[in-house]
Amino acid sequence: MEHQEFYREMLKAEIFTKRRDFRLVPMKDGKPDRVVGEKYIEYLLIKDNQSLRDRFRLDNRALDEWGVRVGIWTRTMSERRRRQQQTATERFEADVRTAEEEREEALEKIGEKIGQLK
């Protein structure tokens, strides 16, 4: 975590009352992106209406992409829409390709680590 000393001081001064995960703070050019942060708060205030939440994500692309990047959602809304138009076989084939690519990348990293041990 960046600025650990600041974080500890805020806890000690009881400005922060509990530990927080700042990895989820939307950033732009190394600074907090208040626009995306405000949009996320708006999104969280939409209760019991998934279609309205989905529409909000579609209308706020930066929020949607940030949420996927930090792991709140697995796919952007545009990707979900694209996948809905595919057949089950096409989605399966795409998922298999993605899994194979991830496996190959993992094997390459393992090979590099083994090479470093020699």
Image (cartoon, rainbow, N blue to C red):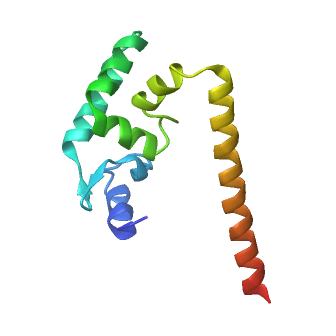
Residue that appears at 29% across and 30% down: 41
In this view, the residue in front, 103 or 7, is 103
Quarter occupied by the C terminus: bottom right
Residue 40 relative to residue 114: left or right = left
Residue that appears at 71% across and 49% down: 100
Image quadrant assignment for residue 114: bottom right
Q: Position of residue 27 (x, y in %)?
A: 29, 53
Most extreme residue toward the left is: 35
Image quadrant assignment for residue 45: top left
In this view, the residue in front, 48 or 118, is 118
Q: Position of residue 7 (x, y in %)?
A: 36, 61
Image quadrant assignment for residue 1: bottom left
Residue that appears at 41% across and 28% down: 77
Count all numbered tags in the image, as a single digit.
Answer: 0
In this view, the residue in front, 64 or 49, is 64
Residue 63 relative to residue 97: left or right = left
Residue that appears at 70% across and 40% down: 96
Q: Position of residue 44 (x, y in %)?
A: 35, 25
Q: Is residue 81 above or below residue 99?
A: above
In this view, the residue in front, 42 or 104, is 104
Q: Is residue 50 above or below residue 23?
A: above
Q: Position of residue 23 (x, y in %)?
A: 42, 52
